[in-house]
Image (cartoon, helix red, strand yellow):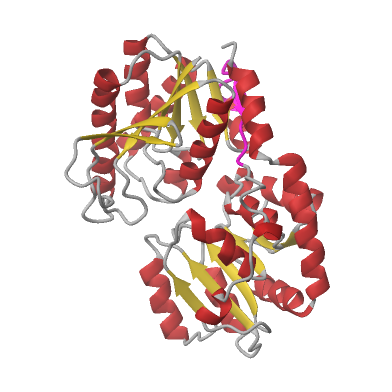
C-alpha cells in the first residue's frame, strides 16, 4: 500500500497536527505501508521560513526514513483574512504542482484539514494519481471559522461549505479527530463513511519515570514549594486565555500559585498587555519550545490548564495537549465542555472541570488543587492509566491500518 499524507503542517514545526501526523506516519511505515509526505516549507507558528529552507520552491528530505517533499508557501505579512488566504492558496497551488511532478504513484491520499482549501490539491492529485482519498478532519472548517468570526464574507463561506461537501462525497473515508466531528459529518452527509481517528500519546516518550530531575523551576524563578499551573499551546482566539489572567487576578494573594503561558500565537501580545495592566506578577509568558523540551517542562509543573471559549462548536473538541499532560501524570483543569469533559473528567477522573470562560470557577479549582497535593497525585495517576488504556498511539495507528488496508 502506497500512502501520501498531504498536509500544510509537519515537523520540524511544533504543534498538534504536526506531531499527530508524524507519529501516525512512523507507525504505518513500521506496519509495512509505503508512506510519503507532501508538505510546506516549515514556518509555523512563527510564520517565518525555518533556517535551511529559505528561498526554495522545492526541498526533499527524509525524516526517520519517511520521504518528505516540501513545496513553497507564501508567508503572510499581516493577520488579515486576505493574507491568510494567500498563505493557504499558495500551498494549494505549489503542492498540486510538486505532487504531480515529484511524487510517484500512490494508492491512497490522506489529506489533513484545516486548511480546508488544501482539498482542492487533494482532488487534483487524486485524479492525476488515480488514487483514493481519505479526508482527515481535525477541525470542522468552515463552521469553526464562521462561528469564531474569522470569516464573515458570505460568498467565501458558501464556497467553503460547497467545497466541504464535495470533499466528503469524493472521499472513500472521512476520518475525524473526535467523535463529535464524525457525528457532525454523518448527520449532515448520511452516505459518507466516517472513522474516529483520535489523537493520542507516545507513552514511552512522555514517561515521567524516565525523565531525570532538572533545575527548570529554578531557572525560571520558581521554588519547589510553588504550585505551577501551565497552559502550553497556541495562544489564539479559540482558547479564550483571558480566563487564566482573570483567575490569576483573583488569587493574587495566594503567593505560592503561579500561572505559565507557554507558546506563540495571534493573541499573545494582547494578553501580555493585559497582564501588565492588571499587574499580575503571578503570570509568566514563555516562548514556544520544541518537542524535545516539553517532557522536562511538563514534568516540572503541577497542573495543566486547558481552556476553550464557551461555544457549542467546542462541545466535540478534544485539545491535543490533554494527552501529553495525562501521560506525564499531571492533573488537568479542563475548561472544555462536552466530549472532552465526558472522557477525561467523568470517565477518566483525571482532573477537575470549570465552566468555559468562568474565571470564578477556575480560581476556585486552582485553590483547591494548590492545597491538596494528594488529590493532584491521584488525578495524575488516573490520567496516565486512562490514556494508556484508551489513547496509545501504537494501538490507534494499528486500528487505522486495519481500517484502510482494504479500501
In percent of width and height, residue 84 lies at 28, 46
Q: Position of residue 344 (x, y in %)?
A: 73, 51
In the image, residue 59 lies in the stretch drawn in magenta: no
Relative vertical location of residue 158 with respect to residue 279 in this rendering, above or below: above
Residue 381 x %, y %: 79, 58
Specify the quadrant of the image occupied by residue 218: bottom right
Residue depicted at 57% across the width and 77% down the height: 217
Along the line of sight, which residue is nearer the eye, 360 or 335?
A: 335
Name the residue nearer the viewer: 338 or 107: 107
Residue at 72% of width from left, 72% of height from top?
365
As drawn, which residue projects farthest toward the top?
Answer: 130
Left or right, 259 with respect to 267, comes to: right
122 vs 338: above or below: above
Which residue lies most toward the left here? 55
Magenta part of the chain = 186-199
| Residue at x 40%, y 67% (from the top left corner) | 268
**Residue at left offset 56%, top offset 12%:** 407
- Is 196 magenta? The answer is yes
Is 31 positioned to the left or the right of 292 in the image?
Answer: right
Question: Splitting the image into 4 quarters, where does residue 360 fall?
Answer: bottom right
Residue 239 makes an appearance in the image: no
Amino acid at each position: 500500500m502506497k500512502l501520501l499524507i498531504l498536509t500544510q503542517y509537519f515537523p520540524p514545526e511544533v504543534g498538534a497536527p504536526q506531531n499527530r501526523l508524524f507519529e501516525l506516519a512512523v507507525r504505518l511505515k513500521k506496519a509495512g505501508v509505503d508512506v510519503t509526505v507532501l508538505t510546506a516549507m516549515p514556518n509555523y507558528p512563527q510564520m517565518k521560513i525555518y533556517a535551511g529552507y529559505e528561498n526554495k520552491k522545492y526541498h526533499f528530505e527524509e525524516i526517520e526514513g519517511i520521504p518528505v517533499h516540501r513545496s513553497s508557501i507564501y508567508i503572510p505579512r499581516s493577520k488579515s483574512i486576505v493574507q491568510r488566504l494567500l498563505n493557504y492558496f499558495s500551498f494549494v497551488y505549489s503542492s498540486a504542482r510538486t505532487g504531480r511532478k515529484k511524487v510517484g504513484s500512490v494508492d491512497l491520499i490522506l489529506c489533513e484539514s484545516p486548511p480546508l482549501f488544501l482539498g482542492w490539491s487533494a482532488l487534483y492529485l487524486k485524479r492525476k494519481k488515480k488514487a483514493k482519498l481519505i479526508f482527515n478532519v481535525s477541525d470542522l472548517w468552515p463552521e469553526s471559522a464562521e462561528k469564531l468570526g474569522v470569516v464573515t464574507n458570505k460568498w467565501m463561506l458558501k464556497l467553503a461549505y460547497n467545497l466541504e461537501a464535495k470533499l466528503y462525497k469524493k472521499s472513500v473515508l472521512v476520518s475525524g479527530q473526535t467523535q463529535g466531528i464524525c457525528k457532525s459529518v454523518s448527520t449532515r452527509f448520511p452516505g459518507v463513511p466516517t472513522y474516529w481517528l483520535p489523537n493520542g500519546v507516545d507513552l514511552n516518550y512522555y514517561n515521567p519515570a524516565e525523565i531525570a530531575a532538572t533545575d527548570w523551576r529554578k531557572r525560571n524563578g520558581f521554588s519547589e514549594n510553588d504550585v505551577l499551573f501551565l497552559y502550553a499551546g497556541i495562544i489564539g482566539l479559540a482558547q479564550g486565555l483571558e480566563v487564566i489572567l482573570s483567575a490569576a487576578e483573583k488569587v493574587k494573594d495566594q503567593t505560592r500559585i503561579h500561572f505559565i503561558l507557554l507558546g506563540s500565537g495571534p493573541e499573545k501580545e494582547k494578553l501580555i498587555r493585559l497582564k501588565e495592566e492588571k499587574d499580575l506578577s503571578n503570570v509568566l509568558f514563555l516562548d514556544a519550545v520544541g518537542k524535545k523540551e516539553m517532557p522536562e517542562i511538563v514534568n516540572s509543573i503541577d497542573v495543566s490548564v486547558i481552556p476553550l471559549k464557551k461555544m457549542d462548536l467546542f462541545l466535540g473538541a478534544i485539545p491535543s495537549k490533554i494527552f501529553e499532560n495525562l501521560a506525564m501524570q499531571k492533573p488537568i483543569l479542563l475548561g472544555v465542555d462536552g466530549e472532552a469533559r465526558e472522557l477525561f473528567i467523568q470517565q477518566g477522573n483525571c482532573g477537575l472541570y470549570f465552566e468555559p470562560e468562568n474565571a470564578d470557577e477556575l480560581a476556585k479549582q486552582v485553590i483547591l488543587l494548590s492545597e491538596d497535593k494528594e488529590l493532584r497525585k491521584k488525578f495524575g495517576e488516573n490520567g496516565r492509566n486512562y490514556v494508556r488504556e484508551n489513547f496509545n498511539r501504537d494501538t490507534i495507528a494499528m486500528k487505522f491500518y486495519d481500517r484502510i488496508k482494504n479500501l
